[in-house]
Amino acid sequence: MDLTPLSALSPLDGRYAAKLAALRPQMSELGYMRRRVQVELTWFVALSDAGFSEFKPLSASARTYLAGLMQGFSEADAQAIKTIEKTTNHDVKAVEYWIKGKFDGHPELLAASEFVHFACTSEDINNTSHALQLKSGRDEVLLPAIDTVIARLRELAVSYAEVPMLSRTHGQTASPTTVGKELANVVVRMEAARGKIAEVPLRAKMNGAVGNYNAHLSAWPDFDWEAFARRVVESPELGEEGTTAADAFGLGLTFQPYSIQIEPHDYMAELFDAVARANTISIDLSRDIWGYISLGYFKQRLKAGEIGSSTMPHKVNPIDFENAEGNFGLANALLRHLSEKLPISRWQRDLTDSTVLRNMGVALGYAVLAYQSLLTGLSKLELNEAALAADLDASWEVLAEPIQTVMRRFGVAGAYEKLKEVTRGQTVTREALHGLIRSLEIPEAEKERLLALTPGTYVGKAAELAKRVGAA
């Protein structure tokens, strides 16, 4: 059976394939292989600049050619490597042989071909490649997806800053807020979570089979291999900060000085936990919006030809928020397994991380898909101010809080208890509350202020707080 969107085992490569086109070049096996080639050639070029008499600096034309191999890496190139792997049964060695094969017809490179993969263990190539994948996947796809959601929430928070809304603590009527303030709460939470994702340093090691530069020092015992590896890992990538093929290539990552055979993956756990935290906040938002749609606070703009139910023609289901919630859940299940499993390796290494790491793109894919659904849902929302106002007007009991608070200010004994007696579990009317207010032994000016209060105006600083996020 040919692999098509209909036959794909994963919906990420089937039903949702088009929605993840931006992530696929970064996090697929093709993206992984492209990064392996990049790391191998970056190390190779850097070795030529290390000052060894046995490996002179490469010429400008050779560097340009190698840069072309890195930047022009194609699916056909990846397939050629897979063909070699059928013989080697070793994926990294297949990359090494493919690179050496590309040196044919280039005498300068052929003469130096034994410096490809020099003193490296496979994990020197793999861990750096994974970090590069996560760097581009995070910075070019995931964070922009989160940013679009934050921007939409900020826009809604400011637009609806002054629209009053009944709060529902424990599902029961509570002190009013505004629609904008509730959305502003999420903006602030998401910005903090987004910052945590962005600030995780992406680490890489280039120190050999057990992290001690054993092979490196056997060749050149007096060379500072640790400083050299740090330079390669931390120097800018080709194309970053104006670097060109004429420069010494780097990887643009953060150096990991201590490791076993594998980089410890603690930064990965930190990153995946940070993504899961943002996803959890988004699940909370998705469920709340779903509930507000159910209450009639929001309507959803209709899409021509769309059907909400196969038997109930009237339905406009909140499917975008439901899809978002479901896919955030899938993402978090994988992300939490990754963060719990990857930092654990028996002795100097076991292979359990290898197959797990191949699912990084799946975990991030579900997250990106969920943010797209969430954004789609947020973009369809239309406020139903009439429903909001009706709910407030039917909930005069929420004014028990300000009345008893003012009573306590002026020393009225048992203020809380008196209001509890007449409001808890009862239908409270405007007239009943006004009668109570008029009977209070408090200054007339305070009575008039309380009498002017309505559930829709009792919103505290909600509007101010909502508008504040618009200035960020």
Image: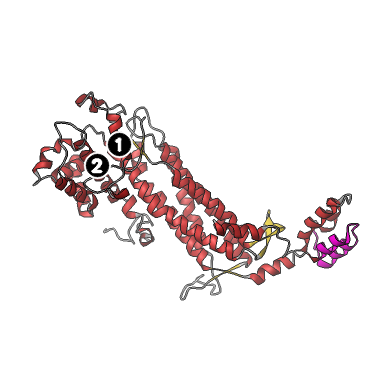
Q: How is the image coloured?
A: secondary structure
Counting residues from the N terminus, which is met first, the one under dot 1 or under dot 2?
1
Residue 107 painted magenta: no
Q: Residue at x 29, y 47 (%)?
A: 32
Mark 1 belongs to which amino acid?
Answer: Arg
Specify the segment rendered in magenta.
425-451
Quarter of the image for the C terminus: give it. bottom right
For residue 195, side relative to residue 388 (left or right)? left
For residue 34, side relative to residue 337 (left or right)? left
| Residue under numbered circle 2 | 248
Mark 1 to mark 2 CA distance (whole Å):
10 Å
Q: Position of residue 431 (x, y in %)?
A: 84, 67
Q: Position of residue 277 (x, y in %)?
A: 51, 47
Q: Position of residue 223 (x, y in %)?
A: 24, 27
Quarter of the image for the N terminus: give it. bottom left
| Residue under numbered circle 1 | 231
Identify the element where label 2 is drawn: loop
Badge count: 2
Q: Position of residue 174 (x, y in %)?
A: 72, 57
In this orientation, does residue 40 appear?
yes
Q: Residues within 10 Å of mark 2 (few under 14, many from 20)?
A: many
Mark 2 belongs to which amino acid?
Answer: Ala
Q: Residues within 10 Å of mark 1 (few under 14, many from 20)?
A: many
Residue 430 painted magenta: yes
Q: Residue at x 14, y 31 (%)?
A: 53
Q: Check if mark 1's residue and mark 2's residue have beta carbons within 8 Å.
A: yes
Q: In the rendered image, which quarter is residue 350 located in? A: top left
